Image (cartoon, rainbow, N blue to C red):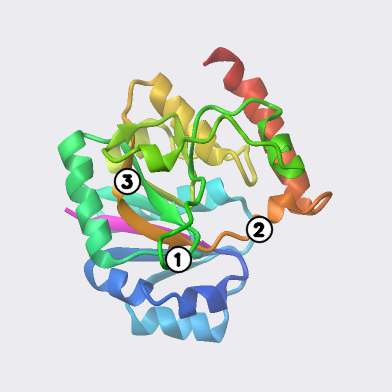
Amino acid sequence: MNVYISIVNHHHDTMIVDNPTLPSLAKKFIVIIKSNTQATTRLTEYCLKHKIHLLQGHITKGFGTNNNEVFQYVKSHLNPTTEDFFLALNPDVEIAVDSVSDLIAQAIEYQADISAINLYTDKSFNNYDQSIRRYPSLLSPLKSLVGIPRSDVYDKSKIDTPTRVEWAAGSFLLFTINSFELLNGFDERYFMYFEDADICTRANKSNLNVYYFPSIKAVHFASHQNRRLLSKHFIWYWQSSIRYQIRLRLVV
């Protein structure tokens, strides 16, 4: 059984090289970096040193498209089996090898098709990252911008056993090979944001199991660039939010 870890690089070369967990992950699992921007010499040498696959892109593409291309690389070059897993992992997430191994064991036990973990924003595991949510309404993101509490966020403090959820953040999503293929991967019409809500929504509608495993912890150093008013990330976020509502939310 193999775990194929997909990391998308978009000017994150230094972040990736400085991530202390990636060399350890690469010793046990197969790590593949899709560089959406020209990889620096430092990143290239780092990948050679730690036996990490580096796929160099030449055209700027979205989060979903890049991960889909990594999956196709896995399918065409690495011969995955139906027992294997595909992990979409943000470059700003730090996780221990044992935690990934424990997650795999729980995912198999609960027959999870898509698995999410307990992400925090600090290394002391005191502050939850709001990474598991219910299906979003159109106005839910606006509440975050103006400081109004959102009703679509699960209260992690009240969840202490593996639980099915509506969707989880794409910063860490573990798929069975079969489920990712069945869903045809991420919808590439989303350039950035809501690809995770979309794929989890489609999974639930297809009677696949989307699980949150609270005992598996990791740190997510999120930048939340979509909260910068009228930035390009803000615009991408709202475009994706509207697309999600039109395409999926109204029929859930």
Residue 5 shown in magenta: yes
Q: Quadrant of residue 209?
A: top left
Residue 38: horizontal and vertical position, in percent? 61, 73
The residue pinned by badge 2 equals: 60
Does label 3 or label 1 sit earlier along the sequence? 1
Horizontal side of 224 relative to 196 (left or right) equals right
Residue 38 shown in magenta: no
Does label 2 or label 3 sit earlier along the sequence? 2
Vertical comparison of 4 with 124: above or below: above
Magenta region, residue range: 1-8
Residue 184: horizontal and vertical position, in percent? 43, 34
The residue pinned by badge 3 equals: 214
Q: Quadrant of residue 141?
A: top right
Q: Main secondary structure of the magenta part?
A: strand
Amino acid marked by disc 2: Thr
Measure the alpha-carbon separation of dots 3 and 1.
Answer: 27 Å
Q: Nearer the viewer, residue 229 or 5?
A: 229
